Image: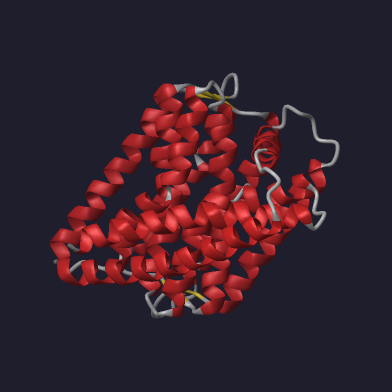
């Protein structure tokens, strides 16, 4: 029963997040904010709204293991499932802007979040922790990335994959009466709040009922559920011949998860790295960092075989993680 209620909560959360992003984007446009800026700040990261709300609420309620699992797990699923499946459907051509801008920044973000979560090994501390100071550092890095990318958008070529995705998403917003914009925004916000609250509650109940850690639930069920928008977006892009845009969408989403969500959650409440969390971080770092050398190989294409490799690595990690959880239980 808890699984059905969790699925219903996730469905409410995802639907409400879509309406919330659409409403707030329309309000921003009616206030005279340029569409490109709306795209860079709201639309481009709109699919990460469920993760943002779930993790901030988890941290506020003290479910820090769930927040950790979802932040790391969402990045793992984005690369190991969403990107991998998209590449297996259609090889991904990597634009030069991704190689020079987003992928290096993702590498910096991954290294930063792994190092900040390695107090036990680097300082000999009793345990590792993402502190509030660490969170502020992550938010600063996110601000630098956002500023650099937005400034780079001025005069950027139309072939820029990441910015093309932003422009197309922003262009899809349609003018609506103010009362409709407000209704979308407020209704979406209410739905997101209730959906996230129920999702956290049912996830914690499932973890306790199964005798597994909240981190495992966050890494698996919640991560897969909250990354469904990215999966749907990328599969549709691949089917209409725009699979190349999927990489920019996934890299942008992971940057938002690690820097913005990771930063905000850590500022709300310091996040202890749970048992086996270091392994989770290392596998997430590997899958993220390996994208750059894969993109640099040959003709700057992530092939079907390389997509299959990413999927196998993720499934191997998932099998090991679930086996460890079962053994601990």
Picture quarter with the N terminus = bottom left
Give the residue drawn at x 39%, y 71%: 197
Residue at x 45% of width, y 73% of height: 57
Percent position of residue 315, x then y: 29, 41
| Residue located at (65% from left, 57% from top) | 181
The C terminus lies in quadrant: bottom left
Colour pattern: secondary structure
Q: Position of residue 272 (x, y in %)?
A: 41, 75
Q: Is residue 298 above or below residue 69?
A: above
Where is residue 56? Give x, y as percent: 49, 71
Which residue occupies 36% across, 57% down? 10
The picture quadrant where one finds residue 325 is: bottom left
Residue 145 seen in this snapshot: no
Q: Quadrant of residue 300?
A: top right
How many numbered badges does the structure rendering display? Answer: 0
Which of the two residues, 299 or 231, is positioned nearer the viewer here? Answer: 231
Residue 26 visible somewhere in the drawing? yes
Q: Give left or right: position of 263 versus 274.
A: right
Provide residue 219's location: percent of width, then percent of height: 34, 57
Residue 136 vs residue 158: left or right? left
Residue nearest the viewer, comparing 317 with 157: 157
């Amino acid at each position: 029963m808890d699984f059905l209620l969790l699925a219903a909560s996730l469905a409410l959360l995802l639907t409400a997040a879509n309406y919330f992003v659409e409403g707030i984007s329309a309000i921003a446009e009616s206030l005279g904010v340029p569409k490109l800026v709306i795209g860079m700040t709201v639309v481009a990261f709109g699919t990460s709204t469920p993760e943002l709300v779930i993790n901030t609420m988890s941290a506020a309620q003290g479910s820090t293991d769930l927040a950790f699992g979802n932040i790391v797990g969402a990045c793992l699923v984005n690369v190991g499932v969403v990107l991998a499946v998209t590449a297996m459907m259609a090889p991904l051509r990597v634009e030069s802007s991704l190689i020079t801008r987003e992928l290096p920044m993702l590498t910096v973000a991954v290294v930063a979040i792994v190092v900040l979560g390695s107090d036990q090994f680097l300082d000999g501390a009793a345990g590792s922790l993402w502190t509030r100071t660490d969170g502020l550092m992550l938010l600063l890095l996110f601000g630098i990335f956002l500023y650099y990318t937005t400034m780079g958008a001025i005069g950027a070529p139309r072939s820029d994959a990441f910015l093309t995705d932003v422009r197309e998403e922003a262009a899809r917003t349609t003018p609506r009466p103010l009362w409709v914009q407000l209704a979308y925004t407020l209704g979406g916000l209410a739905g997101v709040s209730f959906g996230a609250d129920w999702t956290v509650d049912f996830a914690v109940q499932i973890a306790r009922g199964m005798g597994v850690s909240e981190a495992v639930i966050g890494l698996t069920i919640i991560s897969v559920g909250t990354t469904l928008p990215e999966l749907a977006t990328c599969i549709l892009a691949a089917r209409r011949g725009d699979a190349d845009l999927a990489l920019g969408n996934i890299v942008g989403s992971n940057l938002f998860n690690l820097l913005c969500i990771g930063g905000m959650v850590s500022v709300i409440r310091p996040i202890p790295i749970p048992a086996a969390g270091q392994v989770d971080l290392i596998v997430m770092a590997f899958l993220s960092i390996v994208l750059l050398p894969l993109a640099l190989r040959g003709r700057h294409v992530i092939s079907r075989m390389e997509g299959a490799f990413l999927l196998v690595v993720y499934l191997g990690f998932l099998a090991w993680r679930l086996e460890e959880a079962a053994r601990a239980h």
